[in-house]
Image (cartoon, rainbow, N blue to C red):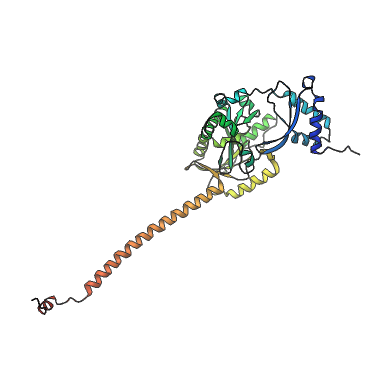
Amino acid sequence: MSERRLSFQEFCETAQKDIRSYLPDSFRDAAVATADFRKLNQNYVGLTVRRQDQTVVPNINLNAQYEQYMQNGGDLDAVLKRIAEQVQLQPELQTDWLKDYDQVKDRLFVRVSDAEKNKDYLAQVPHKTVDGLAITYHVAFDGVQGINASTVVTNDSLDRYGISAEQLHKDALANSQEMLPSRYTSMAAMMMGIAEGMGMEPDLMEEAPPGVPTLMVLTNSSGVQGAAALFYQDKLDGISSGFHSDFFILPSSVHEVLILPDDGNTDYKDLEMMVQQINKAEVAPEDRLSDHVYHYDAKEHALEKAETHERRMKLKERMSEKADDHGRGSQDGRKSVLQRLNEKKAQVSAQPKKDVHNRAKGMNLD
């Protein structure tokens, strides 16, 4: 009979109680704690192991560790050894510089997420919402290579910096484009690169045949949290200029988005159905960006949901038709007035003239 596996609560309690025995003597007096953590797209129980000389340490995601525990047949010893290795590899973070905005400014970058799914988290941090997508502001500890070791700018942080949310947005977006420039390539080229990197022959990866729109990939130079490149305005304008048209954005994940030119014949609902199916079947919950397809209007420089764009275009068309109808109605009205005046003149001209001379003779003027 197989050994009973621990419940998640039992797993967390055991990890907190036993992890010191898997660590070197320097961790014997470390403070071990578990707490609930809320981040973009995910909530989890985190384990922290802090020695007396450490002020801030990263946390270990116990939800992810528990999944490994369940998948490896309930081998608790192996999981605790892995957690101990991660604890020892964690950098000792120095955080005093985080209080100085002049130092923070050059390490800012932006991330994008689903606003509705993260509304509780977003209530605690400054953010900007663009038709269901939320832009948040983060500080990297080690530049480009350290965006996974980062911290979010909170409402309290913003108050401490003494700047406006608008200034934070401007600075973070500008620095993000410097620190994490966009990377834009075809889907076929990206797949070829992946295949070659794995030592495989990319013989099945071919560019789209003539006449078929090429599916493009937009991300950043690191390939991590690259969907934020959607808000690099110059890049969006450059893409539309290259297509000579508007384009659709398929939110593949928080790490990249797919770009497809709007040829005027594509129904965004079909694209949206495909995105939702892929999200459900292939994208981890913490990596999902949105179930909605987006659209970029090159003329208006507007990034919005495809359904919003369609609704806006229909409203614009109705208003144009109404204006045309009003113009025609005004012309008809002016014509009818002139017509009535002409008819009145005709009526007056048609009346018999009265004998004014005879009427004057019959009048007593004394």
- Measured as percent of width and height from the top left, residue 219 is found at 60, 34
- Measured as percent of width and height from the top left, residue 124 is found at 61, 37
| Camera-nearest residue between 324 and 63 | 63
- Residue 257 is at least partly visible in this image: yes
What is the count of numbered marks? 0
Q: Residue at x 79, y 30 (%)?
A: 16
Q: Quadrant of residue 130?
A: top right
Is residue 361 shown left or right of residue 298? left
- Residue 181 is at least partly visible in this image: no
Q: Residue furthest left?
A: 366
- As displayed, is residue 193 above or below residue 352? above
Q: Quadrant of residue 118?
A: top right
| Camera-nearest residue between 192 and 39 | 39
Q: Quadrant of residue 200?
A: top right
Q: Residue furthest bottom?
A: 362
- As displayed, is residue 145 above or below residue 269? above
| Camera-nearest residue between 280 and 205 | 280
| Camera-nearest residue between 283 and 31 | 31
Is residue 122 shown left or right of residue 365? right
- Measured as percent of width and height from the top left, residue 301 is found at 49, 41
- Measured as percent of width and height from the top left, residue 267 is found at 57, 50
Q: Give the quarter of the figure containing the C terminus.
A: bottom left
Q: Give the quarter of the figure containing the N terminus.
A: top right
Is residue 257 shown left or right of residue 337? right
